[in-house]
Amino acid sequence: MKRLTLSVVMTGVLGLAAFSLSNAQQNGDSPRGRGPGGPGGPGGFGRGGVAVLRGVDLTDEQKASIMAIHDEQRQARTGPPADAALRRDLEAEVFAEAPDAQKIATLQQQFVQAQSERLAHEIAVQQKVAAVLTADQRAKVRERLSQAPADRRGGFERHGADDRRPGDRR
């Protein structure tokens, strides 16, 4: 029974890791591409955070306010996101000589919690940006988001890679 449980957990974690890795490569979110300081770091939402504002006529004051929000968020950041370290720890345990199913389950829960906290932070930044916009500007953003193809959502989702294959660089 223990072997079956271990096999099920390992299969699930390996599937999650493979999905995450392939998704990261497709999104250009590999360690070489994006990171906490680059265009994909927390709060920056890849290009989605700024791209959704394209076509919205912002005043100079609004642009300055939005830049200040993003600068404040950038300065508050301390090192790489917690979920990145947890992902490495989780993958290391999955590929260990003798993987510990309990440790894998604990790391998986911690990883999900860290991702949830990161998303909550990203949402808080986006809400601050939305508060700077007028009602008409927010309506333009909503319209833009509703017209975006399913694989190229803005806002909280990172942009897809169109027709690129995993490993292709921008």
Image (spheres, rainbow, N blue to C red):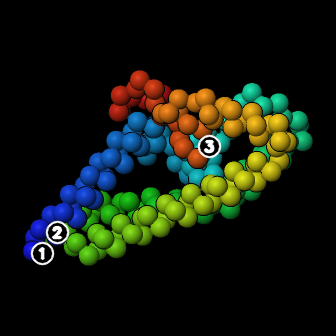
Please, which residue is most extreme toward the top here?
163
Q: In the image, 68: left or right of 115?
A: right
Label annotation for residue 2: 1
Amino acid type, mark 2: Leu
Q: Are marks 3 and 2 in contact (CB under 8 Å)?
A: no
Quarter of the figure with residue 87: bottom left
Q: Residue at x 58, y 30 (%)?
A: 148
> At numbered mark 2, what does the secondary structure look like: helix, strand or loop?
helix
Give amino acid for label 3: Gly
Q: Quadrant location of residue 102?
A: bottom left
- Tell me residue 2's x, y (percent): 12, 75
Residue nearer the viewer, 142 or 122: 142
In the rendered structure, the answer to whether residue 18 lies left or right of residue 116 reads left
Above or below, comparing residue 104 to residue 71 in the picture: below
Q: Is residue 78 left or right of residue 31?
A: right
Instruction: Give the residue type that dot 1 points to.
Output: Lys
Which quarter of the picture shows residue 142? top right
Check whether the beta carbons of the residues at disc 2 and disc 1 lie within 8 A of each other.
yes
Disc 3 from disc 1: Cα separation = 43 Å
